[in-house]
Amino acid sequence: MRIIGILFRRELASYFATPLAYVFILIFLVLAAAFTFYLGGFYERGQADLAPFFNFLPWLYLFLIPAISMRLWAEERRNGSIELLLTQPITLWQAVLGKFLAAWAFAGIVLALTFPLWITVGYLGAPDHGAIVTGYLGALLMAGGFLAIGSCMSALTRNQVIAFILGVVVCFVFLLSGFPLVLDAFRAWAPQGLIEAIASLSFLTHFEALSKGVIDLRDILYFGMTIVFFLVATSVVLDARKSE
Amino acid sequence: MIKTDRLSKRYGSLSAVEDLSFEVSPGEVLGFLGPNGAGKSTTMRMLAGFVTPTAGTASLCGHDVLEAPVAARACLGYLPEGAPSYGEMTVRGFLGFIAELRGLDGALRRSRLDRVFGRLQLEPVLEQTIDTLSKGFRRRVGLAQALIHDPQVLILDEPTDGLDPNQKHEVRTLIGEMARDKLIVISTHILEEVTAVCTRAIIIARGRIVADQTPQQLAARSRYHNAVSFCADDEAQALRLRAALESQAEITAVEYEARGRRLTALPRDGAAILATVQAIAAGQGASLQELQLEAGRLDEVFRSITA
């Protein structure tokens, strides 16, 4: 735990040591506001809730979360610091978890900075604050799922651009796995059971329930298991190819 | 104590390291030599637990690198090739981070940090980010990182690469001082370094050990071991001396370098030929300028056994 904490602090500080964090925060907030107010019709809808924000959030995350996760391991490999890190008296699992938690905390900080939206909606009307809280919880869980996928993709390569593209593609598949775009690719040959299993993997369906204020343990469990699965995959990939 | 037992690493069909078995005891400074791609870095990485051996194993201070990797790494200070670090961190921040990972805190952490800052002369750059440092400073940050916890075993992959002659001297002095109670393995391309700091040299080529001796023993394998060289007074004298020396039974060959009129007489089987050379030179009235007795040329030994 102590080791994970040390790695977590170093990693989180490294986001803010370069302009990266600030550029990212700025872009995220500008896009979130643009989506919410223009595309989402925040005012025109005449309803006091954050649905316009939460509806577009998965699409914003699709591109912006891989941008956070792409550097996790690819950068360490590129500049060789992975050798320094993994020859310290720590386990691979501690390193994977410490770095992932730092990225997740950073995503959480960025998400928290959208609080003016909440204040606005509270000022203009009487929103269901409970639903907004579960919406934020769902958003945080979804960010964690995307980051775990991105961490695994970043472990595969020493090139951050490749890590980013792989991350976007895999996240896209997971986001839309309940939709015809993905399901049709399986429908022709896969058994019905498998198709239903794939459909149930969709980030979008699990997130939608949460963003509407419904806390279903299965949704939370789903994101938790996705995170665990991809972090285990990250350490398997790293163990096999860390020195290449 | 480092012990390797038939340590091997294969990459597909390519064998990088094959059946490497050796032991190193405290007080020894082992120089790891070999051409590029001979398997030096791969071996060091296996000892540090970064590369997993395909066969065999190794242990550091009695901890097996495969079965107890964290304990093995805890007694090791390791400088990877190229001295990588986190460029966006300051020197102070980076070394503080490593000290924390090494489990140092409070007063002990401060005193250890102050000691490595002093020993590697890092004080002027403590608040600079590592990205902005010169190559020499980066290498010293890498060394500081390996020394911070005062480890029993030090493995340094090319510790003096990129340093200027003064800094090289500093690092060699540092290694010499630490050698008393530690066990140090360095890899290097600089053969004079082996003579300067190592008590033992292992030369590997194509993943195998081809020599394991003291630097003196290695040098004695050179055909220049006990060779005598001097400068002749003029061209004609040089030619006369060359002919006279070549006729001696215990001299196998005489090399002549026209630029400095330098003659080098090579002994047969390392025989002592200084007296013979002096006697012949006296007979020719030569003044024997810049007379030298050679210990042997490591680079020549290196080439002859690795090529």
Image (cartoon, coloured by chain):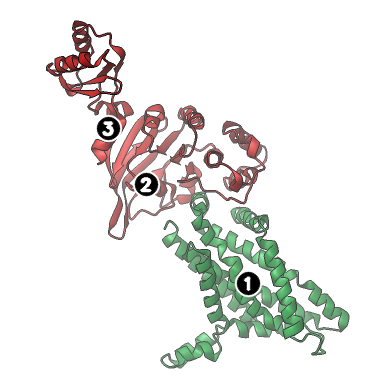
In the rendered view, tell whether residue B213 sits above or below residue A6. above
Q: Nearer the viewer, residue A134 or A155?
A: A155
Question: The residue tagged with tag 1: helix, strand or loop?
Answer: helix
Q: Mark 3 lies on which chain?
A: B
Q: Which of B236 and B175 is in front in this view?
A: B236
Question: The residue tagged with tag 2: helix, strand or loop?
Answer: helix
The chain drawn in green is A
Q: Position of residue A232 (x, y in %)?
A: 50, 67
Give the alpha-carbon distance from disc 2 to disc 3, as whole Å.
Answer: 24 Å
Give the alpha-carbon distance from disc 2 to disc 1, as whole Å.
Answer: 41 Å
Question: The residue tagged with tag 3: helix, strand or loop?
Answer: helix
In the rendered view, tell whether residue B76 sits above or below residue A40. above
Residue under label 2, please give it.
B43
Task: Indicate which disc residue B7 carries.
Answer: none
Q: Is residue B227 visible to the viewer in this orientation of the structure?
A: no
- Work out which quarter of the rendered image holds the C terminus of chain B and state it: top left
Residue under label 1, please give it.
A64
Marks 3/1 same chain:
no
Q: Position of residue B164 (x, y in %)?
A: 49, 33
Q: What residue type is labelled 3?
A: Glu
Q: Earlier in the sequence, mark 2 or mark 3?
A: 2
